[in-house]
Amino acid sequence: MDYRSSVAQGSTLSQVNADALLLVLTPEQSQTADPVLDALIQDAIQADDLALKAGRALYLHRPRGVKTARLVLAVAADAKPKSFKAAVAKGLSLLKDGGAGHVAIAAAEGFKLDADHARVTVLTVADATYVFRLTKPSAPKAGALKKVTLLSADDQAAAVKAGIQQGQGIAEGVTLARELGNRPANHCTPTHLAAEARRLAKSSKSIKAEVLERPALEKLGMGSFLSVTNGSAQPPKFIVLRYEGGAAGQAPVVLVGKGITFDTGGISLKPGAGMDEMKFDMGGAASVLGTFQSLALLAPKINVVGLIPTCENMPSGTATKPGDVVTSMSGQTIEILNTDAEGRLILCDALTYAERFKPAVVVDIATLTGACVIALGNLHSGLFSKDDELASALLQAGQAAQDTAWRMPLDDEYGEGLKSNFADLANVGGREGGSITAAWFLSKFTQAYRWAHLDIAGTAWKSGGAKGGTGRPVGLLTQFLLDQAAAGKDALAPREAKPGRAAAKTTKTTKAPKAASKSVKPEKQVKPAVARKSSIKPAAKA
Ligand SMILES: [Zn+2]
């Protein structure tokens, strides 16, 4: 798609050179200062063909006196980017099946377009024109639309241009995350995600990719991660991505993405209905890869590390059983009461691995719990953090990117349910507050740095007729990284190591602190669970 910005307003608007003109009005701003257009708008309103209400739109073919063959009037609730986005999406839907290759988009007089409007326009066009065809060659061909020009007044042009550029970078990342999510699990395997990481590294000088295979993971003592792979014939991968746009030695932001490429639930097997959607259980991984794609294009001055533990969760004779106890890389032992709570089992080892980067902050992204979908539906991702500064930076980025999150509690009392008689921690509590106990479980592995968790189980994909990946929260993450890069010395930095931190780890609910304190030198740790497990070769199963 070719995106342009151009200066046109007032009386020149009806003479714009394009195949279609999409004009966004609001109830307060419905004039253009172009007499031709204003007469058409007035006429449409008087004839009751257009009401100045949000969501309304009207298509006019070969309107008299207008140079473009097609004119669409679309009404936004107000001048906010979010409302503009909805109106543009509605307007584009009226042009979708037509022959317009070049659409010019403009707003009514007095409606000031800024970088945010431009960015959401690009994201809306990218969303409207995406087609999944890898496994559906019969999918309708991409529409005629090839070029979009955003028209603005002279004094808005620079902001609009910057917004378009930013939107293009984010849109590429969103599209990659969507595409990976949509790919069936027999295509999008852990090996495929690793190949995508290598492709990103090849395509950009500022990105490096490393893929750790099973022997390396065993050596690291990732007994929790590896326990999830026991029933699968697909080899697990641990992807390490680095984007080096900041100063050497600057503490990186670490993004950790859950990459379960298919989740059957394991021995705690899920019900059959809707199980196909468990191919989307790598949405966290997809969002990290998508964000790196955006970083490659936008080149912000920041250092970012992406960690993706990826595997399948399958039932088999070699699969992990409920009640099995494994030793995580942190040294803490985990009783796996439910093998379907596997996301936290792969994430916890990745979170321990994250310590070695001495991160500014760590954000993990995971399609973690159905409970989060019950709590928040599909509108907001769940945000969990005890770090107010980090939480508010993420919330703000979500607002700006229109990829919102909602903060959930994380009180220590929620850890009560994760007590086990046989291990330091159980991997599930009761049904109540399930998204919070999941986050609390992760918090037991994140004591060494500032951390936040995004539960995207409700936002990473859509069900029903519109079934498909959304590419969320690439928008939020990219915006957060751009904000951090722009913040300079006010960017989030590693918290000073506080004396007595080890003592702070003690909670009422587990006896973990001793084990957790080992996590600073994970390589030297013995790994009984892994050693035992590795003698069972899941790949050997028929
Ligand atoms: Zn699961």
Image (cartoon, rainbow, N blue to C red):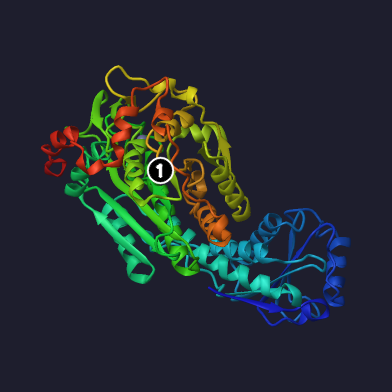
Residue 376 placement: quadrant: top right
- For the C terminus, the image quarter is top left
Residue ranking furthest to the front? 499
Above or below 224: residue 37: below
x and y percent of residue 249 in the render? 40, 60
Q: Secondary structure at mark 1?
A: helix
Q: Does residue 338 appear left or right of residue 35 in this picture? A: left
In this figure, which residue is indicated by the disc labeled 1? 277
x and y percent of residue 420 in the render? 33, 19
Q: Quadrant of ligand 1?
A: top left
Tell me which residue sits at (30%, 55%) in the image.
Answer: 187
Tell me which residue sits at (53%, 61%) in the image.
Answer: 485
- Residue 132 in view: no
How many tags in the picture?
A: 1
Q: Does residue 20 appear left or right of residue 301 in this picture? A: right
Please tell me which residue lies in front, 334 or 118: 334
Residue 321 placement: quadrant: top left
